[in-house]
Image (cartoon, coloured by chain):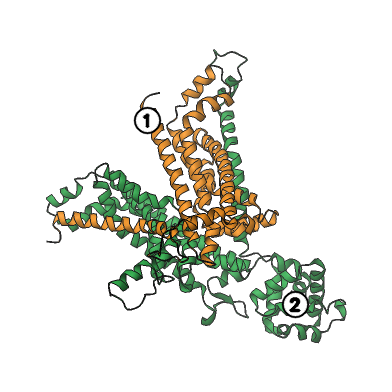
Chain colours: A green, B orange
């Protein structure tokens, strides 16, 4: 090292390992910063919307302050709170945020939106506004729940949406209770998302095992051709494949046409927009990933394993079940983790090929953002989805560690 | 009798054929439908015609979408490849704290449910005033594709002998020159593979596009997506075939490059 010419810049550069590592870190930095700014922070902000109460906290300051000592069992509060609310409404109108505030309140108590918009006309002189005036345009002010909601503006955070996303709410006393059965929909959606993902994973495992064995035992050039055929769908558009299934399974599609031609059915079956069609499309998309995961482990195992087991007196099933399958389990586990995690987040396929009862969490995240602009609830459902992914990831890591130890 | 080994092997083979047919059916079925002379997405087709290919290459809705897809794909690929290659070199050669965490952060877009990313992009680009612009989609797709580039370049750097860089330096090459004349040519197959897959990621992406693009900037998958919901016509099938063909060509090209690189290495040149 010391032999280098003193004028060579490189000698300084390579002498200091720390300096070199700093330079290499600077190569990582642009992408890291890019992902943090365009992915991490936006996703974090979206998830934060699940608990974000800033809008109400900012715009209903006076009302919330006037309710500091109030509690729901006291009934509707006194005139001072009505007057504070009139001030808040006027301030929000001046700031141009009244529409958003009314919308946010409406998400928690349906039907109050128009009242708050109409109240904007009454509050030019907030101190002259009477209890009767305000109650006339916002009838809900004559009842306790709206006042409880207004009092919640004391905090910059709310648990309303997170509770709502698992069919819970707070009663008048503030205790967490189940929502009435007719409004409970989200637990059903979460279970459905889990059930569909588990079923797709199980179907993929069952269908993949024989294929992986055939691929592992095939001789070139067949092994290469078979593998390419399995891989090819992986590289073609998910959207295209989903659209194809709609065409194949529709009323006039080839499946129904064949069944009609064979005389097996009298009239076309309703195959598309069902849970069955959703499974078909999802398995078709995710199956290659499972086959690859199992194949990668299978190729490393000696081929004579099963024969050794059977020669020691086990029948074929025992040999497969007790010897081969445990050795394949790392591949099955990795494949299951990949398939399950992808399946949990599925959006395009259920939207296009599932019926209304087959939609998964992602569809509702999109729906509450696009259609009802209920960002709090969309954020809360996104939090549930992320929680499921996290549990799946932790479960996979735990299983893997367990497998390594034994 | 059932466990007779030959029969079992034949059943497994039959099962594999059925599965292959199942995997390939949705792709195969698009070919005749795109060539139909009718106006419905049904089989068997009433007659053959190239009409629907003419539609997607002349109807402005489809041509605009195709051009947009290419522009977004190329720009996002360029950005993802530049950022991803640099990051992979840094992660592969550097020894600094938090490397695993950095790789995890960079890989985040791969595991995030796409809808969450789409909604997050929507509110982010709305807040910076870029919503509906082509730039927003390019940036979003670059983030989605960069982890793929990082993975492939990391893999090809594993086989790179770093003494070559030292040899270059000892002969007086500066860091930039070594990078350009030694490193890039040798890991080029990895970079190119990463770039091609990055392009496919962008070219096929529909969810983020449907959240953040305006009608004038809609991409090909986005146009197919709205086509499925609004007006089902065989043009969708023709567009799908074009999408698959472009993917297929790029993929064949990728494997050709990889094979050539391997032969090159084996040849000892």
**Residue at disc 1, secondary structure:** helix
Instruction: Name the side, left or right, on which A234 lies relative to B222.
Output: left
Q: In the image shown, does A381 or B228 lie closer to the viewer?
A: B228
Residue B150 visible: no
Q: Is residue A177 above or below residue B153?
A: below
Q: Position of residue B113 (x, y in %)?
A: 51, 58
Classify residue A131 by image quadrant.
bottom right
Q: Chain of mark 2?
A: A
Q: Residues within 10 Å of mark 2 (few under 14, many from 20)?
A: many
Instruction: Name the side, left or right, on which B34 lies relative to A204.
Output: right
Mark 2 vs mark 1: tell me if same chain: no
Residue occupied by mark 2: A116
Q: In the image shown, does A318 or A252 lie closer to the viewer?
A: A252
**Residue at disc 2, secondary structure:** helix
Q: Position of residue B209 (x, y in %)?
A: 58, 56
Instruction: Give the number of callouts.
Output: 2
Residue at image position (34%, 59%) is B22
Cα distance in 3D space between marks 2 and 1 = 74 Å
Residue occupied by mark 1: B263
């Amino acid at each position: 090292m010391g032999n280098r010419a003193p004028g060579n810049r490189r000698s300084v550069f390579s002498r200091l390992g720390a300096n070199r590592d700093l330079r290499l870190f600077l190569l990582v930095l642009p992408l890291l910063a890019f992902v943090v700014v365009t992915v991490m922070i936006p996703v974090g902000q979206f998830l934060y919307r699940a608990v974000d109460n800033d809008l109400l906290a900012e715009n209903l300051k006076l009302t919330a302050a006037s309710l500091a000592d109030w509690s729901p069992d006291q009934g509707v509060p006194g005139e001072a709170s009505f007057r504070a609310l009139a001030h808040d409404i006027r301030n929000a109108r001046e700031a141009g945020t009244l529409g958003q505030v009314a919308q946010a309140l409406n998400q928690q108590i349906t039907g109050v939106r128009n009242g708050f918009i109409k109240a904007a006309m009454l509050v030019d002189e907030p101190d002259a506004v009477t209890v009767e005036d305000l109650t006339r345009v916002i009838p809900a002010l004559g009842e306790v729940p709206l006042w409880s909601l207004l009092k919640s503006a004391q905090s910059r955070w709310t648990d309303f949406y997170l509770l709502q996303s698992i069919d819970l709410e707070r009663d008048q006393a503030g205790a967490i209770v189940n929502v009435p059965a007719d409004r409970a929909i989200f637990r059903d959606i979460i279970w459905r998302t889990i059930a569909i993902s588990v079923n797709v994973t199980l179907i993929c495992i069952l269908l993949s095992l024989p294929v992986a064995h055939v691929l592992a035992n095939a001789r070139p050039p067949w092994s290469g051709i078979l593998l390419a055929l399995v891989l090819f769908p992986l590289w073609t558009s998910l959207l295209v494949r989903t659209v194809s299934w709609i065409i194949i399974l529709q009323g006039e599609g080839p499946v129904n046409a064949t069944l009609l031609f064979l005389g097996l059915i009298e009239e076309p079956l309703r195959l598309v927009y069902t849970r069955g069609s959703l499974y078909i499309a999802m398995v078709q998309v995710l199956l290659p990933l499972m086959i690859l995961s199992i194949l990668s482990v299978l190729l490393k195992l000696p081929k004579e394993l099963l024969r050794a087991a059977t020669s020691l007196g086990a029948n074929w099933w025992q040999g497969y079940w007790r010897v081969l399958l445990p050795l394949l389990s790392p591949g099955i586990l990795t494949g299951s983790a990949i398939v399950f995690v992808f399946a949990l987040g599925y959006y395009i396929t259920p939207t296009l090929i599932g019926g209304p009862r087959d939609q998964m969490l992602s569809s509702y995240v999109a729906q509450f953002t696009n259609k009802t602009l209920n960002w709090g609830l969309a954020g809360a459902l996104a939090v549930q989805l992320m929680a499921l992914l996290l549990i799946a990831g932790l479960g996979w890591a735990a299983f893997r560690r367990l497998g390594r130890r034994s | 009798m059932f466990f007779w080994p030959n029969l079992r092997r034949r059943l497994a083979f039959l099962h594999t054929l059925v599965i292959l047919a199942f995997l390939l059916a949705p792709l195969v079925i698009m070919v005749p439908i795109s060539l139909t002379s009718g106006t419905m997405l049904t089989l068997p087709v009433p007659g053959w015609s190239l009409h629907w290919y003419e539609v997607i290459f002349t109807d402005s809705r489809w041509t605009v979408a195709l051009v947009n897809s290419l522009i977004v794909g190329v720009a996002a690929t360029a950005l993802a490849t530049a950022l991803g290659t640099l990051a992979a070199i840094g992660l592969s050669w550097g020894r600094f704290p938090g490397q695993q965490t950095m790789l995890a952060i960079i890989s985040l877009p791969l595991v995030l449910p796409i809808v969450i990313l789409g909604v997050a992009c929507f509110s982010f680009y709305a807040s910076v005033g870029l919503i509906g612009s082509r730039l927003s989609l390019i940036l979003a797709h670059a983030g989605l594709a960069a982890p793929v580039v990082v993975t492939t370049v990391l893999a090809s750097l594993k086989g790179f002998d770093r003494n070559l860089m030292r040899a270059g330096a000892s002969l007086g090459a500066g860091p930039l020159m070594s990078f350009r004349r030694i490193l890039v040519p040798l890991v080029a197959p990895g970079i190119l593979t990463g770039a091609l897959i990055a392009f496919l990621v962008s070219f096929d992406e529909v969810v983020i596009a449907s959240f953040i693009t305006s009608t004038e900037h809609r991409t090909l998958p986005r146009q197919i997506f709205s086509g499925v919901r609004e007006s089902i016509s065989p043009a969708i099938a023709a567009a799908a075939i074009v999408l698959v063909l472009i993917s297929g060509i790029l993929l064949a090209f990728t494997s050709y490059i990889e094979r050539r690189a391997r032969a090159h290495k084996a040849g000892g040149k």
